[in-house]
Image (cartoon, rainbow, N blue to C red):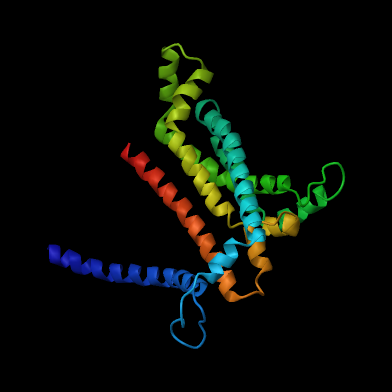
Amino acid sequence: MKAVVANRKWPYVWLLSFIMLILLLPVVATFMYAVAVDWGISLLPKGWTLEWLAQLWQDRRFLLALRNSLLICLAAAVVTILVSFPIVFLVHTRWQRHAQWVNVLVTLPFAVPPVVSAVGMLQLYAQGPLAMTGTPWMLIGCYFTIALPFVYRALDNNFRALQVNELLAAAYLMGASTRQAVWYVILPNLKKGLLIALFVSLSFLMGEFVFANLLASSQFETLQVYLYSIKNMSGHYSSALVASYFTIILIMTFCLSLIDNKAVGD
């Protein structure tokens, strides 16, 4: 019986292996091209070098773009978490009847294409007292709308698993106020969930291009805008940039996995 079950699993194993090969092959080729001396008509590169990576990480423009991306994404993620937390808390404690409407409002950013949103914001904030085009504040606001559905859903799932109403009831029985219950009971139990929401937001905000290119472009250059600007340069240099970007995202994903595994273990 076990042999029959094992034989049935093999087609799925081969299928998953084939899919993984298709997904990993471009990434591996990009990393190889980033450290290749010359890779033309031959099957493998003629040699290996770290020249392109060294040149990239010595480029002040790249370092500035990386710093801008990290700062903007981190600021947007923190703002999104600060705004989402009280909303999720109220939905689970006092606004249960309105939860479905809040879910609809939170997912509204998905209904509008980023290009349409960017054009509308350009018309609203290009001139006048609220002129913010080309500033990081504009990008933080736009990134907030992108991250809101993901952060809200992550916190909502954590609140459901936490059974926040039971914790609040226990805190009230001990004589704690709502503020004390949130600060000393709810937040410590949500620490890992908040970190997961933060890393998830950073991971996909780092790859955002449309808003950064249309609303800021060279005035506040991010990593994706910088990558677009060097498209006509050496392919080795572009591959080094993409490889570095993948490595940064991989580190974030690894940290997220560690936090998630620790949360499951606890």
* Residue 135 rendering spot, x and y as whole percentages: 75, 48
The correct choice, above or below, for 259 with respect to 159 in the image is below
Q: Left of 263 or right of it: where is 222?
A: right
* Residue 176 rendering spot, x and y as whole percentages: 47, 14
Q: How many marks?
A: 0
* Residue 217 rendering spot, x and y as whole percentages: 73, 59
The correct choice, above or below, for 124 with respect to 48 in the image is above
Nearer to the camera, 32 or 119: 32
Q: Residue furthest top?
A: 175
Q: Residue at x 62, y 39 (%)?
A: 79
Nearer to the camera, 167 or 26: 26
Q: Residue furthest bottom?
A: 41
**Residue 135 shows up from this direction:** yes
Nearer to the camera, 92 or 15: 15
- The C terminus lies in quadrant: top left
Q: Residue at x 56, y 41 (%)?
A: 103
Q: Quadrant of residue 57?
A: bottom right
Q: Residue at x 53, y 62 (%)?
A: 244
**Residue 108 shows up from this direction:** no
* Residue 102 rendering spot, x and y as whole percentages: 59, 38
